[in-house]
Image: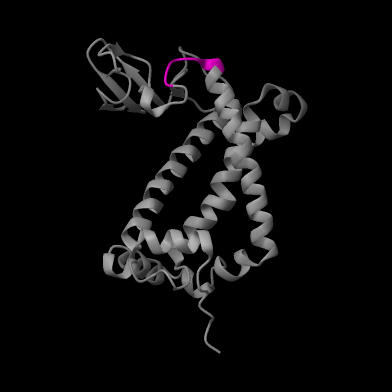
Amino acid sequence: AHPRLYWGEYGANGDYAWMAVGSSDTMGYLRFGDLRIETTGVLGNWQDDQGRTQKWAFPGWATIPSSYSLADGRRWHFFFAWIFSVGLGLFILRSLWNRHVQQDLRIGLQEWRPSAIWNSIKSHLKLSNIRQTGEQGYNIIQKLSYVGVIFVLLPSMIFSGLAMSPAMDANWPLLTDIFGGRQSARSLHFIAAFLLVLFFFVHIAMVLVSGPVRQMTAMIFGGKRKEPPA
């Protein structure tokens, strides 16, 4: 509805937006600061299924609902927000209870070494190594990714969303102040969302490369847990 992001407390058409999706009669663009990237056909200026040129930010196939309706969009937004929020809470409680976090996601001191992180990155770039990681413990890149998603990105989505709520701002103004204002909370909300989408695509790509049938079977029915050597 308002494809522009700001820092601070205020944000309107006349204020400076650090990121914006815009359009002219002939092109669409994505702007970061002073950098403008043409996105004609994807963002800001695209063709709908009737062949008509549309200038609102995102194409219909990328949004729910596919037509412009702020009210319906808010309903869908909060519907999925409750699913993910409750699911995250249950997952964290379960992961702490069965010690999944302590046993599988704990990062040792040796793993923080730059050489260890670099070796893990190089290992991920080798498809043959990725295919062999099914029964092995998580490496440092996987641990950082999962910890970042579970304990940083998803909670920040929830709390930044609450900070944008007028009711929460009126009753708990400290939450909005922590984010530096409602517009800063909105920017961080979108940044976290973009990073989650990026994680999703990279994660699915890794699953496909490492053997999707075996991975999905282990996720649904349980896989063999490799015990550490005595």
> Is-magenta flag for residue 70?
yes
Judged left or right of residue 21, residue 184 is right
What span is colored magenta in the figure? 66-71
54 and 144: which is toward the camera: 54
180 and 154: which is toward the camera: 154
Q: Residue at x 53, y 34 (%)?
A: 189
The spot of residue 29 in percent (x, y) is: 29, 23
- Residue 200 seen by the camera: yes
Judged left or right of residue 19, residue 105 is right
Residue 27, compared with residue 203, is above or below; it is: above
The spot of residue 118 in percent (x, y) is: 35, 66
Residue 156, compared with residue 92, is above or below; it is: above
- Residue 143 seen by the camera: no
> Is-magenta flag for residue 219?
no
* Quadrant housing residue 214: bottom left
Q: Residue furthest right?
A: 171
Quarter of the figure with the C terminus: bottom right
198 and 86: which is toward the camera: 86
The spot of residue 52 in percent (x, y) is: 27, 11
Q: Residue furthest bottom?
A: 230
Q: Residue at x 47, y 44 (%)?
A: 196
Name the dominant secondary structure of the magenta segment. Answer: loop
Judged left or right of residue 206, residue 165 is right
The spot of residue 94 in percent (x, y) is: 67, 58
Residue 51, compared with residue 198, is above or below; it is: above
1 and 207: which is toward the camera: 207
